Image: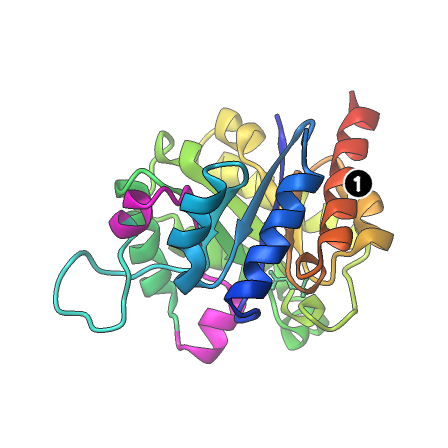
Amino acid sequence: MRNIVTGNWKSNKLWDEADKLMSELVTGIQSSGNTEVMVAPPTPFLAALQSKYNDQISLASQQCSANGEGAFTGEHTASMLKSIGVTSVLIGHSERRESFGETDEAVASKMERTLEAGLRAILCCGENLDERDAGNHFERVLGQLSHALKNVDAAGMEQVVIAYEPIWAIGTGRTASAAQAQEMHATIRQHLSTLYNETVASSTRILYGGSCKPSNALEIFTQPDVNGGLIGGASLNSSDFLAIVAASNEAISKAV
Ligand code: PGA
């Protein structure tokens, strides 16, 4: 199973900066080894980056509409993304849930729209600090997953990647320890075997996100249930992001 390392640029960079970063990544990733490298730039840049770099690095959208085509001002549908060559959609990122009121129900609809359009969903989940301190983190994360996946069958899971991102670790510089990440990833995998079956559980990739950087990526990626990362801040400069991709390749070669 190949790892996935995805850069989430969030709401950062103007066009010239985005173009420069993409060009550095394309040059730096001549051969990505056993890691699929993907970036999620701001939506206004997707089409231009796709036509300029033409599939050299696959593109993800940071979100999509819960609806199909129609009178929904400001929204972009999963099918629109598919039509310009985007391959994947981040769904349920904690910043969307917290700052834009994205509910579990909306997340479930976005999952459906994304899979219907033939795109891959990178489903984000994670607990906040209060939930972790109260010992409710497993319940919280598994609850988010059960909700989001309620209309996804075992075949649909081939298009799903899960990203565990503890909210207290996002952009804070405070990373989950490798042991904390592994514990949650193993629990998520166990949950998938309950919701689906062993095959789905073992073949679904589970990425870690939250202050992942060159100095800690290798330790996290070598955990048995971690299949790569969703990288925010450290994806905004090419040398850090490329170092994280290299850490993923090194982790895979150690595991073989
Ligand atoms: P971070 O963000 O790497 O800056 O913590 C991760 C994310 O939000 O996807």
Say which residue appears at 54% left-offset and 28% top-offset: 203
Q: Is residue 33 above or below residue 109?
A: above
Q: Is residue 13 above or below residue 256?
A: below
**Residue 219 or 128: which is nearer the viewer?**
219
Q: Amino acid at mark 1?
A: Ala
Q: Quadrant of the N terminus?
A: top right
Task: Decide: few, some or many residues near mark 1? Use Cα within 10 Å; few <14, some 14-19, many ≥20.
Answer: many
Question: Is residue 80 a member of the stretch shown in magenta?
Answer: yes
Q: What residue is pinned by disc 1? A: 247
Q: Which residues are magenta?
A: 79-101
Say which residue appears at 63% left-offset and 55% top-offset: 21
Q: Is residue 107 above or below residue 27?
A: below
In the displayed structure, does residue 21 sit left or right of residue 114? right
Can residue 121 be spotted in the picture?
A: no
- Colour scheme shown: rainbow
Label 1 residue SS: helix
Say which residue appears at 35% left-offset and 51% top-offset: 111
Say which residue appears at 57% left-offset and 69% top-offset: 13
The location of residue 180, given as percent across then percent down, is: 76, 54
Q: Report if the beta carbon of the residue with label 1 is closer than 8 angstroms to ligand 1.
A: no
The location of residue 119, given as percent across then percent down, is: 36, 41
Toward which corner of the image does residue 135 lie, by quadrant? bottom right
**Residue 172 or 179: which is nearer the viewer?**
172
